[in-house]
Image: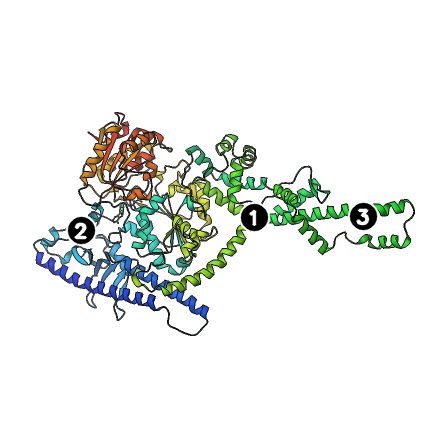
Amino acid sequence: MGLRQARSVKPAGAEAARQAAVRAEQEYMTRLYGRLDEERSSAEAALRQGPAAGGGSVLQARVESAVVTEEAARRLARLNGVEEGLCFGRVDHVAGADGPGDTFYIGRIGLRDADHEPMLIDWRAAAARPFYTASPGAPGTVARRRHLHLRHREVVRLDDEVFDLEGLDEAERSGLVGEAALLATLRRGRTGRMSDVVATIQEEQDQVIRSALQGVLVVQGGPGTGKTVAALHRAAYLLYTHRDVLERRGVLIVGPNATFLRYIEQVLPGLGETDVVLATVGELHPGLKATAADEPAVAVVKGSARMAGLIEAAVADRQCAPPDGLRVEYDGLTLRVDAERCAAIRDGARGLRVPHNVQRRRFVHDLLEALAHDRAEQYDRIMDEPLDELTRSGQMPRWLQELIDESADEPLLDETDLRLAKEALWQDPAVRRAVDALWPELTPERLLSDLYADPERLDRAAAGAGLDPAEAALLRRPAGAPWTVSDVPLIDEAAELLGEDDSAERARRRAADAARAEEVRYAAEVMETTGGTDMIPIGDLISASELAERHGDGGPPLTTAQRAMADRQWAYGHVIVDEAQELSEMAWRAVMRRVPTRSLTVVGDIAQTGSAAGAASWGQMLDRYVPGRWREQRLMVNYRTPAAIMRVASEVLAAVAPDQTPPVSVRDDGPPPRAVELPVDGLPGLVAEELAGFGDGAEGRLAVITSAARHARVRAVLPGAAVGATPEALDSPSVVLTAEEAKGLEFDSVIVVDPAGVLTESPKGGQDLYVALTRPTRRLTIVHDGDLPPLLSGSLAGG
Ligand SMILES: Nc1ncnc2c1ncn2[C@@H]1O[C@H](COP(=O)(O)OP(=O)(O)OP(=O)(O)O)[C@@H](O)[C@H]1O
C-alpha cells in the first residue's frame, strides 16, 4: 500500500470533539467487554456442567462429555486470549442512497449481542477486509478507518484515516499526518517475543494472508518486510476460513531453530488460533530433536538430493544373497541353500513394492522354507540309508518296496510339516543370526549409523548414487555420535524406505489402544475438575519439544497437533515454511512428504541464504514438486530497520548479491549507525551504555552479533549476557549470538563485532553480514579492530 499516502486526521483545535469521540468509543468498548464477560461465564458454566444428560450408553456419554468439554475449554482459552486489545479498529462505509453507511468494529474475535446482531467482526472475516485494504488511491466504499488504542479496557487514543476528503474542512485536512498507528506500533521497544499485528496489517501483507489455500505460495521479501508475521497471520486466517479441513489435518509451521519458534510462539494463541504444530527441520521426524549443525561442506553433501539415491543404495546393500550360498548348523546338520536359490529369494522379496522391513517377511518366509526343505531332504537321505542297504543286499521285502514306490510321488513335507519345521527353525538362534545377517530388520537410525561408521558400505552406496569418494568420506563418523539437523531428513527418508519395523508397529498399536482408554479416563477427569477459569485449557498449539515432554509423562495424544507430531506419515492440511531459503533439497523432500496436497506457504529471502546447502533460487527447490505451478508474492517495505541502517545493509547486499533488491524502510527515525574501533575488552562499556539508553522500562533488547572466531572472547568479556539461540536468551536484556543464530530475530540495539570475520565466515559469501546488519529496530553499532571491510566504510559514520 502507498504507506506514505495513507493519512490520519488530527482534528486541530477540536479537542472537545476528540474527547467526545473517545467517550463514545469507550461506551462501545464497555459494551463489548461486557459481552466478552458474559461469553466467558457461559463457557465456564459449560465446563462445569458438561453435556446435558441424555440417552445412550455410558461410553457414548463419556465421549460426548469429552467433546463438549474440549470445545468449552477451547472457547474459554480463546476468550481469555483476547482480553488485551479486544477491539482495535472500526470502518465506516460511505453512505448510500438507501441510508447511512455501515459501521463495523474489528477485533481479535467476533462477538454478537443477545439478539445475534454482530457487535464485533473477527479480523479474518470478509467484512473486516476493507479495514486492511482501503487506501487513499483505492478506498472502495470506506469513508473512514479508525484505529482504537486501548490500555486494558480503556480507550487511550484514536487515529483516524479519512478517505472521503470531501467531507473534511480545511483545518482537518491540514492536520493529516502519516500512518500514525503503524509507526506507533513499530516504535515500541522489543520484548524478546513477536507480537501480533492484527491492528496494522498492511495491504501487501493482507494479500499474502488471504491468498487461497490451494497450491504453493512463495512470499519473497527482504529483511523486516513482515514475512514471518504475515505467515503467522495467514495460518490464523486459513484455520478460520477453512476450519473444517484444517482442524482435522492441522497446520505445520517449520522454522529455522527452537529459539525462533519460541520467539513467534505466542503470536498464534494471541490471534486466537490453535491446531498448529511448530517444528524445526531437526524435529520433523517423530522422536528426534537434533540441534547440532554439520560443517558446511558436510551439510552440503547431506543436503543434496543425491542422498536419496545413496540411502536407497544403502538399503539395497542390506539385502544380501551370499555368493557361496547359505550354510547354517542346525540340529546336528549343516543346512544349505545354494547361491542361485538365495539370489532368487532375495530378488523375489525385492520385487514386492513394499518397504524393506515388510519385504523382509517374504525373505524370511522363503529362506526358512528353503532351509526346511533341505533339512527334510537330509533326513530323508538318512532314513533311506538302511533301506538302500536292504536293496543292495537283496533283502528288501516286497511289501516294503511297494510301500516305498507308492509314496514316491508324495512331497517330503506337507503343509503342516512345513509350518512346524519353519517355526522350529525360526526359534533357533543360529538360524536367526544367519537370516538377520542377510536381511536385517532395520530402524532408520541404525541404517544411517551403520552406514556412517563403515567406510566400505559408504563407498558402495555412494558409488550407486553418483557421489564421489571424497564426498562419501565427508559423511564418515563414529557410531553413536549425536544426530545433526541435516541427518533428520535423511532419517526420515530412510524411514520411508524401511517402513515400520515389526516391533515398532506392535508398540504403536499398543500405544493407540492405551491412548484410547486414556482419553476416556482423561475426559472423565476433566469433568471432575470443574474449576472454571483456572482449568488449563487443552493446549493445541504445541511445539515438538512440548510434545516429547508430554509423551514422556505418558499423557494421551489428544489434539490434532499432538497426533500429527507423533505420526511420521501424517498429511497436514497446510504447511508454512519460514526462513525457507535455508532448507536443503533433502529437507524439502521431508517437508513435501508431509503435505501431499501441496498446499504450502513458503516464506523467505533468497538474499539471506546462509546455509551452504540452502536455496539459490525458489525454482531450484520447488520446480521438481510443482513445476511452474507456484505463485510468488513480493513484500517490498521494511517495517523493522530504520532507513539509515538499511542504507549500510544495502551496500553489503549490492556487493554480495547484486541481483537482489533491498526493501524500502518505512521508518527513518533513530540515530545513524556508527562504526567504532574498539578492542573486544572495551565491549562491556559499550554494552552498558546501550542498555542504559533503553531507560528503566522492562522493554528493550540488545544483541551482540559476532563472528565464530571472536565468539569465545566476546562471551568471556560479557558474563552478564545470555549466550546463543536459547529460549531463555529471548528474555535476557542482552545476548551474544552468531549471525546464523540471529536469523529471523530482531533487537532494539545491535552491536556487530568483527564484521570482517562475519563476512569471511559466511558460507555463501557475505549473506550473514547482511542478516546481522538488518536485525536492529533502532540502533546499530559496528565494532572493529581497524579492519572495517571497505564495503562498510563508505556508508558509516566513524566513532
Ligand atoms: N503490518 C505491520 N504492523 C506492525 N508491525 C509490523 C507489520 N509488519 C511487520 N511488522 C513488524 O516488523 C518486524 C519485522 O517483521 P518480520 O520479522 O515478520 O519480518 P521478516 O520479513 O520475517 O524479517 P527477516 O527476513 O529479517 O526475518 C516485526 O517486529 C513485525 O512485528
Instruction: Answer with mark 1 or mark 2, whichever residue precedes in sequence.
Output: 2
Please state which amino acid type lies under the numbered disc 3. Answer: Met
The one nearer the camera, 18 or 361, is 361
Secondary structure state at the residue bearing disc 3: helix
Badge nearest the viewer, 3 or 2: 3
Dot 3 or dot 2, earlier in sequence: 2
Q: Nearer the viewer, residue 424 or 256?
A: 424
Q: Amino acid at mark 2?
A: Arg
Question: Residue shown at 53%/37% (left/top)?
Answer: 451
Q: Circle 1 sits on which residue?
A: 355
Dot label at residue 146: none
Question: Which residue is at the front of the view, 303 or 715?
Answer: 715
Q: Residue furthest left?
A: 13
Asked which secondary structure carries label 2, the reply is strand
Q: Residue 273: x percent and y percent? A: 33, 56
* Inter-mark Cα distance, 1 to 2: 62 Å
Which quadrant would residue 101 be assigned to in this image? bottom left
Locate residue 763, reporting x and y percent.
38, 33
Mark 3 packing: few (<14 Cα in 10 Å), some, or many (20+)? few
- Read off the residue under disc 2: 7
| Residue carrying label 3 | 383
